[in-house]
Amino acid sequence: MINEVYEYQKLVVQNRIVRAATNDYCGEEDGSISAKQIDLYRHLAQSGIGMIITGNFFIAEDGRLDSNQNTIDERFDHDGAKLLCDTVHTYGSKIIFQISHAGRKTKVSELLAKHFDSAQEIRDEEIDTIITGFAEASRRAKESGADGVQIHFGHGYLLSELLTERKDGVEIASKLFKAVREIVDIYPVLVKVNTDIPDYIKKNFYKCCEKYAIWAIELSGSDFIQKTKKEHLYYVKDIQICKDSCNVPVMLTGGLRNKEDIEKALSKGANLVGMSRPFICQPDLLTNLDTEGSRCVSCNRCFHIYKERKQHCAMRSE
């Protein structure tokens, strides 16, 4: 099952393995794509990964997470993005641009973080501007040659706040999807969402995803950094909830460490499986998946070690 070709809405992926979105901390300070990033994605694509989801591009300056994040606002590095896409496509992999607004998690300004801290106080006109930002970001991704976009509704970022902390959260998601579809039409649009939100919200959100022909729903969570290396398949139970709520393909991410984990996720109904930290630890993991699992021990030092030592993983030399 792992190596089966996957096709949906005319997008063909060479296998079921996805490099889930991962902050590489290598973007230039002006938001452009760096030579280090091109090399990183080349290495990932060479290993045979079916689909690579980028680290999140910020759709507006007030939604920037940190200084090394890539932009997809009006300053978008179109040439760098095209080179990135061409590099990945050379090896048969597909590339999806994840797009986000950091909301209260922005590190650009404490005032901005405080402003976005209450979803209830975000004005309607601000939400309209944010929706337009996501739609325009989707257009830029399509024009650069990316195979799709993934809209980030998880991990405490702004869309996660709006979805879970406002009564009109699903309605806002619907307006966003409608705006994106009006600009990019049938272009593949994925979403990433936390599973640890109230059932009535996520079921309505899943139905909304079906209405707007979302290409895949990635099931994730905000508690993954608290998991130990002994825990696997963190969110596998939510596959069935999603399948019962809508007819949208499912991607499961979180706690997949070896071939057995992947096969179990696929047998439970996942269409694709995503891994992030295992590929930080071993970018060429797929070349020896049959004989060993990931060496990742979930130490989570990858969240800060690059800025400390210019090293992506404590478990490998670079």
Image (tube, rainbow, N blue to C red):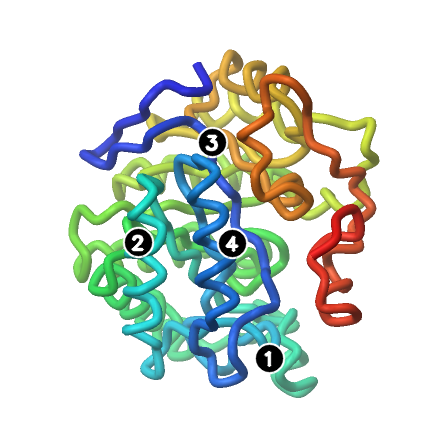
Q: Position of residue 296 (x, y in %)?
A: 74, 38
**In the rendering, at what x and y percent does residue 31 appear?**
47, 79
**Label 3 to label 1, Cα distance in Å?**
30 Å
Badge 2 is on which residue? 177
Q: CA distance from mark 3 to mark 2?
A: 26 Å
Residue at the spot of label 1: 67
Left or right? Give the position of 199 relative to 35. Answer: right
Whether residues under marks 1 and 4 lie with C-beta atoms below 8 angstroms apart, the answer is no
Residue type at tag 2: Phe
Q: Quadrant of the C terminus?
A: bottom right
Judged from the image, the secondary structure of the residue bearing numbered disc 3 is: strand
Task: Look at 37% across and 29% down and name the residue there.
Answer: 249
Q: Earlier in the sequence, mark 1 or mark 2?
A: 1
Q: Earlier in the sequence, mark 1 or mark 4?
A: 1
Q: Is residue 197 visible?
A: no
Q: Residues within 10 Å of mark 1 (few under 14, many from 20)?
A: some
Please, what is the three-letter code of the amino acid marked with disc 3? Ile
How far apart marks 1 and 4 lie (CA) works out to: 26 Å
Q: Earlier in the sequence, mark 3 or mark 4?
A: 3
Q: Earlier in the sequence, mark 3 or mark 1?
A: 3
Look at mark 3 in the image and give the residue it sits on: 17
- Looking at marks 3 and 2 on the same chain, the residue that comes earlier in the sequence is marked by 3
The residue that label 4 is drawn on is 163
Which residue sits at x=25%, y=30%? 8
Please state the total of marks drawn on the protein image.
Answer: 4
